[in-house]
Amino acid sequence: MTTPVHHLPADALAGYASGEACEAEALLIATHLALCPACRGAVAKLEDLGAATLLSLEPAPPLDLDAMLARLDDPEPVPTVAPRPRVAPTGALRAFPEPLRSYVGDFDGLPWKTKIPGVRSAELGVALGEVPVRLNVLRPGLRLPRHTHAGRELTLVLQGGFENGHGHYGRGDIEVGLPDDVHAMVIDAGDPCIALSVNEGALEPVDLLGRLVSKFVRF
Amino acid sequence: MAQVPPPLSLPKVLVQLTPRMHARPGGTVVRVTAPDQNALMARIALGDRDAFAELFQHFGPRLQTFYLRGGCRPDQAADLVQEVMLVVWRRADRFDRNKAAASTWIYTIARNKRIDRIRRERRPEPDPDDPAFVKGTFVASDAVVDAAMVREKLLAAIDELPEQQAHVVRAAYLEGKTLKVIASELDTPLGTVKSRMRLAMQRLRTSELLGGVTP
């Protein structure tokens, strides 16, 4: 099994390890981690760093031990937000590792929109905060016009791949789209490309076709 | 062209947080070692309440500070600390000392509790039992280091950052604030705070402390 070539940026790893990343970002990050032992190693080290900071905090005065011991026969606290039900990796869902698969749930039942030929997009989940998470399915061989981003965007490839002028991105790879990076994309021949994107800002197209595209997709 | 990730050789300093001397304000020194913690965890897994009390007395007050700095009220913080330690008690038999130090395991429970109880969000995580999960090992070290040294190096590396970046890192890592909260406290746009964090992490990457963290 090959492992990813393009990895998560350091601040994304740190945001995940510290818990600062919102659920939308954490979903993309955790799904890359499922495919990338190297980034899992980095997160483990950053969690050690978190533990070091915890231990370096000045301890509060001793806590009420009796109150603590009195709770030891309680059941484990139930999470405030129920976890997504697990989904078996069958059919189209085989492309999606956990935790993403549980968020996709029913692939064909997602609110797919095809507003330009060759690109189908669906927003995932409902309560992922203010950050949109979008699944895109791109037709093999498609060329997307030059465009840029208002904020940083992380894209995780799940199936197929593309070329964007900086390199080739295949399953498990992370593409980091930055505001000052104007780029076009060419989707690989073969299988449709499926990618998950989390956008920290609105798209800012630089030409007419890009502006048109921006109404329908975010890359 | 395939880029091969460089080996993940984080300074051994961070890999395991073992024998340590904590100088506490007031002059008393509490000695807690990772082997002690592993021994405590093994006893707790068998239902030993005395061992649990010892672990609670070490971690509880630090967890309390962790939640207070994160903006919790004292009663809310105390309740969260109890919940974290209850999870430690309930899951002690599933703690694997080969995967992480006990302190790291407890830190992750505290972090996840904060996400669940304060932010009311889920914590998406990979599932090692998922058939799509790509197995692989990463370099781990069994080096024995001094946590006081880790702390010094960490604080020194942060101190070397430009003040605005250092502030964001301290608030996010030491106080557990979200970037959104930090932005509103500073009355600064979220994007600015995010880019400060990004720049800070880029700098820390090149420091000894976090060298090699990014594959």
Image (cartoon, coloured by chain):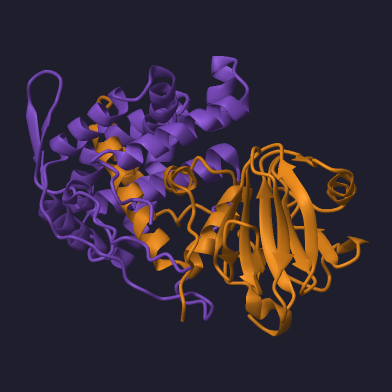
Chain colours: A orange, B purple
Tell which of B130 and B204 is nearer to you.
Answer: B204
Q: Is B84 positioned to the left or the right of B115 in the image?
A: left
Q: Is residue B175 above or below residue A218?
A: above
Q: Is B130 positioned to the left or the right of A110 in the image?
A: left
Q: Residue at x 45, y 57 (%)?
A: A75
- Locate residue A182, reporting x and y percent: 69, 45
Which residue is at the far top? Answer: B187
Tell which of A96 and A212 is nearer to you.
Answer: A212
Tell which of A157 and A179 is nearer to you.
Answer: A179
Q: Is residue B191 above or below residue B48?
A: above
Labels in figure, total: 0
Q: Residue at x 45, y 29 (%)?
A: B70
Q: Is A4 positioned to the left or the right of A123 in the image?
A: left
Asked if one can make out residue A104 in the rendered structure from this viewpoint, the answer is: no
- Locate residue A168, reporting x and y percent: 58, 66
Q: Is residue B139 above or below residue B170?
A: below
- Locate residue B145, reporting x and y percent: 11, 47
Asked if one can make out residue A211 in the rendered structure from this viewpoint, the answer is: yes
Q: Residue at x 38, y 42 (%)?
A: B82
- Occupied quadrant, residue B102: bottom left
- Locate residue A100, reporting x and y percent: 62, 65
